[in-house]
Image: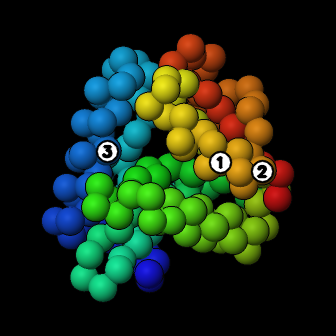
């Protein structure tokens, strides 16, 4: 599997991100959806990666720089045909390594509190992420959980 910086111009990525947004809408009320669409992922403070196995899009993930010491994981998603094959773990390892390379002292994320998000929460916990208070512009929300990891 190869991970590369993605310019968000490909149809496969657009489709995967649209599926991601639709899935978030299915499990979360509108005011609790923090997933970003294509235009919001094309910001200078966000680096977006896609993971490929041959010609197949396996997944994606992004890193948003909140400040020089703090990054946020965004838009982690595995393509349906690649689930349970280690794609999310592979991408998460990459994002953590890049965060360390950048010199961040803290890496944070927001995810859902509902049962559908339990696999994601378990994955993050297995990498040393711990539950924390809302960070950046987030507010307390019963539909969200916040996690961070000291680097």
Taking the image as shown, residue 141 lies to the left or right of residue 1, namely: right
Q: In the rendered structure, which disc, 3 or 2, sits on the residue that comes first in sequence?
A: 3
Residue 46 percent coordinates (x, y): 50, 58
Gap between marks 1 and 2 measured at Cα: 7 Å
Residue 105 percent coordinates (x, y): 82, 56
For the residue labelled by badge 2, is the local secondary structure a helix, a strand or a loop? loop
Q: In the rendered structure, which disc, 1 or 3, sits on the residue that comes first in sequence?
A: 3
Marks 3,2: beta carbons within 8 A:
no
Residue 60 percent coordinates (x, y): 41, 62
Question: Which residue does the numbered mark 1 point to in the structure image?
Answer: 124
At 46% from the left edge and 53% from the top edge, which residue is drawn? 76
Toward which corner of the image does residue 50 lie, by quadrant? bottom left
Toward which corner of the image does residue 96 lie, by quadrant? bottom right
Q: Is residue 138 visible?
A: yes
Question: Which residue does the numbered mark 2 point to in the structure image?
Answer: 128
For the residue labelled by badge 1, is the local secondary structure a helix, a strand or a loop? helix
Q: Name, please, the residue furthest toward the front.
A: 84
Marks 1,3: beta carbons within 8 A:
no
Q: Nearer the viewer, residue 4 or 8?
A: 4
Question: How many numbered dots are placed on residues in this image?
Answer: 3
Taking the image as shown, residue 31 lies to the left or right of residue 134, namely: left
Gap between marks 3 and 2 measured at Cα: 25 Å
Q: Nearer the viewer, mark 3 or mark 2?
A: 2
For the residue labelled by badge 3, is the local secondary structure a helix, a strand or a loop? helix
Q: Identify the mark at residue 96; answer none if there is no mark.
A: none
Marks 1,2: beta carbons within 8 A:
no
In the rendered image, the vertical position of residue 109 relative to residue 12, given as above or below: above
Q: Nearer the viewer, mark 1 or mark 3?
A: 1
Question: Which residue does the numbered mark 3 point to in the structure image?
Answer: 20
Toward which corner of the image does residue 80 lie, by quadrant? bottom left
Taking the image as shown, residue 96 lies to the left or right of residue 18, namely: right
In the rendered image, the vertical position of residue 92 relative to residue 53, given as above or below: above
């Amino acid at each position: 599997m190869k991970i590369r910086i993605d310019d968000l111009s490909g149809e496969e990525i657009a489709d995967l991100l649209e599926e991601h947004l639709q899935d978030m809408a299915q499990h979360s009320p509108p005011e609790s959806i923090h997933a970003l669409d294509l235009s919001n992922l094309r910001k200078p403070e966000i680096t977006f990666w896609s993971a490929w196995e041959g010609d197949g899009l396996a997944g994606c993930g992004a890193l948003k720089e909140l400040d020089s010491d703090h990054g946020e994981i965004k838009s982690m998603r595995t393509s349906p045909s690649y689930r349970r094959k280690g794609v999310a773990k592979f991408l998460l390892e990459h994002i953590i390594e890049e965060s360390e390379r950048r010199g961040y002292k803290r890496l944070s994320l927001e995810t859902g509190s509902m049962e559908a998000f339990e696999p994601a929460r378990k994955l993050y916990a297995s990498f040393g992420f711990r539950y924390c208070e809302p960070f950046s512009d987030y507010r307390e929300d019963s539909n969200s959980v916040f996690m961070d990891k000291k680097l």
